[in-house]
Image (cartoon, coloured by chain):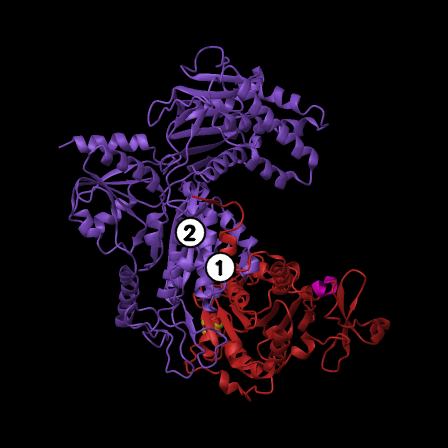
Chain colours: A red, B purple
Amino acid sequence: MSDLPNYTFKDFASDQEVRWCPGCGDYVILRAMQKALPMMGRRKEEFVFVSGIGCSSRFPYYMETYGFHGIHGRAPAIATGVKLANPKLSVWVITGDGDGLAIGGNHMIHAIRRNVDLNIVLFNNKIYGLTKGQFSPTSDIGQKTKSSPYGNTQPPFNFGELVMGSAGQFYARVPDNNPNDMADIFVAAEKHQGTSVVEVLQNCVIFNDGAFDAVVDKSVREDMLLYLKHGEKMLFGKEKSKGVRFNGRQLEAVTLGENGITEADILVHDATDPNPSMHFMLTQLQYPLPVGIVRSVEVPTFEERVAVQVKNLKERSKYKKVDDLLFSGETYQV
Amino acid sequence: MFDDGQTVVDDQATSKIKLDHVVIRFAGDSGDGMQLTGSQFSDTSAMLGNDIATFPNYPAEIRAPEGSIYGVSGFQVHIGEVEISTPGDDVDVLVAMNPAALKTNHSAVQAGKMIIVDVDEFTAKNLTKAGYAQNPLEDGSLGSHVIIKAPITQLSREAIKDIGLDNTSMNRTRNMFALGMVFWMFSRPLDYTIKFLEKKFGHKPNIFEANVKVLKAGYHYAETLELLPSAFTVLPAKMTGGTYRIIMGNTAIAWGLLAAAEKSGKQLFLGSYPITPASDILHELSEHQHFGVVTFQAEDEIAGIGSAIGAAFAGDLAITTTSGPGLALKSEAIGLAVMTELPLVIVDVQRGGPSTGLPTKTEQADLLQAMYGRNGECPVIVVAPSSPANCFDFAYEASRLALEHMTPVILLSDGYIANGSAPWRIRSMADMPPITPARSPEPGAEWMPYLRDPQSLARQWALPGTPGFEHRIGGLEKEDMTGHISYDPENHEHMVKLRAEKVQRVENYIPELQVDGAESGDLLVVGWGGTYGSLLTAVKSLHEEGRSIGLAHFNYLNPMPRNTREVLSRFKKIAVCELNLGQFATLLRSKFPEFQYLQFNKVQGLPFTVLELNNHFLHLLAKP
Ligand code: SF4
């Protein structure tokens, strides 16, 4: 690692002109990623960014790394192939709520379940941007869009729940106005062995402006967001005077000192608990909205399991070369 | 008893009639083990030096109701002293394990030929299930066949009554009785099958013993039976010297891919989703992970090819395998591989379509899908193997073309050659042609993602992990050379033409078209892919009779061999024969409109029979 160049974010910016709308949350994510990569202790040529289709999926073009702009929804599948072909690479999937949860939903859940060492970043803006403003699988009921002029009637996915339901072992959520936390989370995602999923709450200024303002805006976020830290109490609010407890049935927000609530009642976040029940509840909690690393549990990756099999097979197999196979078994002379 | 193609030699010592070829069909319930019985017979015959061709015909249902017509499974074997190219049209010996098997197969047996039935299975209940109002063995409705009514069930059970097996296990040995009978009739030794049984059932000594006992019982029953006064023997065929093995088309494809990976020094990656009749390739390659093969069973067809494209980007010899419906699902991704100019082999083992169609039957109706079934101008190389054995060569060739020309290649196999088996003169790796994958850029070189070889137009292949060549590619139109996104009208047209030209230039890297039979003359039979055996047999026999007939059989469908026009021009008539409604004929008409194309088509889920081809060609030759 000693010969690792001293990268800065500039080393990871490509010469391509960034074409997102001014003010789009995607800019923050791009910058956070360019900031995070030098912190990962890897060489530039080891990074591969794979995307699908949508505004988010332009991302690889702006990164001075290996990149593959795929087709709609299929990035997890393509990235899986890249990683299995060369497990030494750091492989990233960049996707959105339409790309990753509608047309590519099947690939998403199977990639997560399989636990290939991929890092998936899903830009959730609750809308289709590139096709100009239709509702997406994360749009709210009642949300008015070009294809739901009288309000959306399809209930949304909660992506965190979906990750938990797909046996995900790493899930983090981060708003797009917090580039420092975001960069740290990207670094943690890269470090985690297995599929890491990061959901970014991303503002689309054009078609769904302010979708997350009620919780993520700088003026309210201290009171509305729960910043999860492994090993720390789930306290929130400017004065950290509020917290989250388990009332025997579900999680609830409480105020210290009210109704006899003390710090002892407040839950301690354990992101490494193999039992996902608490993580499930955290993904479902709406107030306060948990952000940060919800779950980070190391289990063997798909590639590790394969490598063990292949190693055993190689030792046992009587076929060292293809010729050995071709001439094996029942042959006869003419 | 055998009318055509036979050589009767009076052999005093054994009083056996010698034949130059014979067709045997084993038919029974899907649970009766007919595929195993048939392949034991064909493998044993191949070991004796016969040429063989086989045709398994099994139902789509895994376990259809016992005794029903749609649960009948068949396995046909053609063995010969002469060169055998097809599993044969007319059956010389039919083994029917129950009434349903007789009902569905007896029309394939010509008058005078032999039918062996398990008479114990002809109960009132089974006759009803098969749709017989009366017992055909008794009402004379079968016509003039030699019917051998063997109490196979009863004798099998009798032979093993002391072993102590349960009823089901006892009944499962019946197929060995039938096999034993046929082994004796054709003077085959039992040792190959006994060895096989030992391997299969060695860990269950009871079952092993029972199967061997029943096999021998069938053999001795045939020997002592008055109804089989003499036996037949088929002498070894005259084949090119060498080491042979019996191989199935799907296995040969898997091995050809392994060979190409080893030769090119590339890791083999298979991204695939199970589908009949292609899954055996996935199974076979999964067995051989010790070679460093990565097999990835994906969540669907699209993820199968998606992962393969990712692996190709990362530098592997990447493969995806499927059948027609799966090829349809992969269309968009094939376009991505065309746009990104990555090497990729797409194996389509064709089956009857459209939609789910006839999953276990053969057809050649995916040709135009392979050629054109994508959005945009999206050319790929299309090649087709023409026999179970040359599936090896064309899997290898498809890999070579993909790696050397940086483009997807579709390999069009079909259910008939995929499941058929034939003797294969084993290639040694030293004899395989070299494969030189597209170059990777030299360290420090001036480089751009779409920098091309001036002759082949293949772009260079810079692999993730290589310092200095970080680049982005994808499905959006690319500027020539730099690979930057470009919506420029002129550039788009230029790139469309360039991609087409790259595929067209492959004609300079493939062999010319050969003609079997007459080199020029009255009738040129044109075929492609898996119909070669039937077409060759028909054309050869007519040519040997002195007719002016030749066969141009295509393995390279896009681009076509560079002498195609010249070959077509040498004959007065051209008849394009295919198992579809005329897809290759359509292609030929568009590429070489100066010729007239007659068509001979069949879409029944079945291969051509030599007889129907013969009749048709005679008819064409007779017309002015
Ligand atoms: S449409 Fe929305 S998501 Fe897309 S670039 Fe513009 S602001 Fe960003």
User: Label 1's element?
Assistant: loop
Q: Position of residue B33 (x, y in %)?
A: 56, 33
**Magenta stretch: residue A310 in it?**
no
Q: Residues within 10 Å of mark 2 (few under 14, many from 20)?
A: many
Q: Quadrant of the C terminus of chain A?
A: top left
Residue B158 x/y as whole percent: 66, 21
Query: Majority secondary structure of the magenta segment?
Result: helix
Residue identifier under label 2: B392
Please say if B583 is above or below B311. Answer: above
- Residue A208: image x %, image y %? 51, 70
- Residue A244 placement: quadrant: bottom right
Furthest-bottom residue in this view: A6
Specify the amino acid type for callout 1.
Ser
| Badge 1: residue crowd in 10 Å (few <14, some 14–19, many ≥20) | some
Q: CA distance from mark 2 to mark 1?
A: 55 Å
The answer to whether B163 is drawn above or below residue A204 in the figure is: above
The answer to whether A97 appears left or right of B407 in the picture is: right
Q: Residue at x 57, y 23 (%)?
A: B220
B577 sits left or right of B294 in the view: left
Q: Residue furthest right?
A: A260
Circle 1 residue: A148
Q: Is residue B328 above or below residue B61?
A: below
Q: Residue at x 23, y 36 (%)?
A: B543
Q: Which residues are magenta?
A: A276-281
Residue shown at 34% from the left, 35% from the top: B608
